[in-house]
Every structure is written in structure tokens, then in C-alpha cells.
Amino acid sequence: MTTYNELLKQIESLTKQAEDLRKSEFEGVVADIKDKMQKHGITLADLGGGEKTSSSRASKKTSSSSGSKVAAKFRNTSTGETWSGRGRTPKWLAEAEAKGAKRESFAV
């Protein structure tokens, strides 16, 4: 019967073999990818540079202002919550307006 220590040695040996094989295959895989990129005219920019992208380049649409912060236009004085005036009206403002408050009274 195989002992625990013998199994650990086998695991270590197999792990080393797997890593050595991965390293030896690495250059071939990279060369294959570069060849395919060249044949199809694919650039690193087409691959998204590490960003999550859709599978179709044509469907990728970005705004020049995407990700930029917008100044707050309205503030809830009791909680300090703010809203830029864009998108869906926040619950705190909608509830205040339902009670009769004017949106302008929350202007920053």
C-alpha cells in the first residue's frame, strides 16, 4: 500500500513535470497565436488590452465621457446623499417630491 508521504512525492513530481511541459509548450502556443493574429490582421488593441470586451469589434461602442464623474446637483440635507440629476430619480428625492417638496429646494 502507498503511504501518504509517497503520494506527496508523486504529487510534487507530477506538478514539476506538468510545469516543465507547460513551459516547453508555451513558446509554440505564443508563436501559433502570433501567426493567426498576423494572418487575420488582429492587433492587440482588437483584443481589448485586458479589458472585458464583446466578441464583436463592431458592437463595441464607448463614450468619450464614459467613467467620468459628474458634479452633484441635488443633496439630501438630512443624510448628505447626492444626485447628479442623471438617470433614475433617487428614492429619497422621489419620496420628498411625493410629500410636496420642490426638487429645486434640494439644489446644491
Image (cartoon, helix red, strand yellow):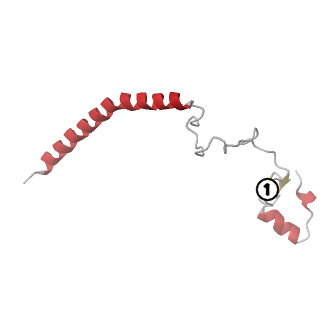
- x and y percent of residue 23 in the render? 32, 31
Measuring 18% from the left and 45% from the top, which residue is drawn there? 8
Mark 1: few, some, or many residues within 10 Å (few <14, many ≥20)? few
- x and y percent of residue 12 in the render? 21, 40
- Give the total of numbered labels: 1
Q: Out of 99 and 51, give the one closest to the viewer.
A: 51
Left or right, 30 with reference to 88: left
Left or right, 11 with reference to 84: left
Q: Secondary structure at mark 1?
A: loop
Left or right, 90 with reference to 103: left
Measuring 57% from the left and 34% from the top, which residue is drawn there? 49
Residue farthest toward the bottom in the current orientation of the protein: 99
Q: Out of 53 and 59, give the one closest to the viewer.
A: 59
Among the 4 quarters of the image, the one containing residue 75 = bottom right
Among the 4 quarters of the image, the one containing residue 43 = top right
- x and y percent of residue 91 in the render? 77, 65
Measuring 93% from the left and 57% from the top, which residue is drawn there? 104
Residue farthest toward the front in the current orientation of the protein: 39
Measuring 83% from the left and 63% from the top, which residue is drawn there? 93
Residue underneath mark 1: 87
Position above or below: 1 against 53: below
Instruction: Say what amino acid the circle numbered 1 marks.
Output: Gly
Q: Out of 43 and 8, give the one closest to the viewer.
A: 43
- x and y percent of residue 34 in the render? 47, 28
Quadrant where the image shows the N terminus: bottom left
Among the 4 quarters of the image, the one containing residue 51 = top right
Left or right, 13 with reference to 36: left
Position above or below: 59 against 33: below
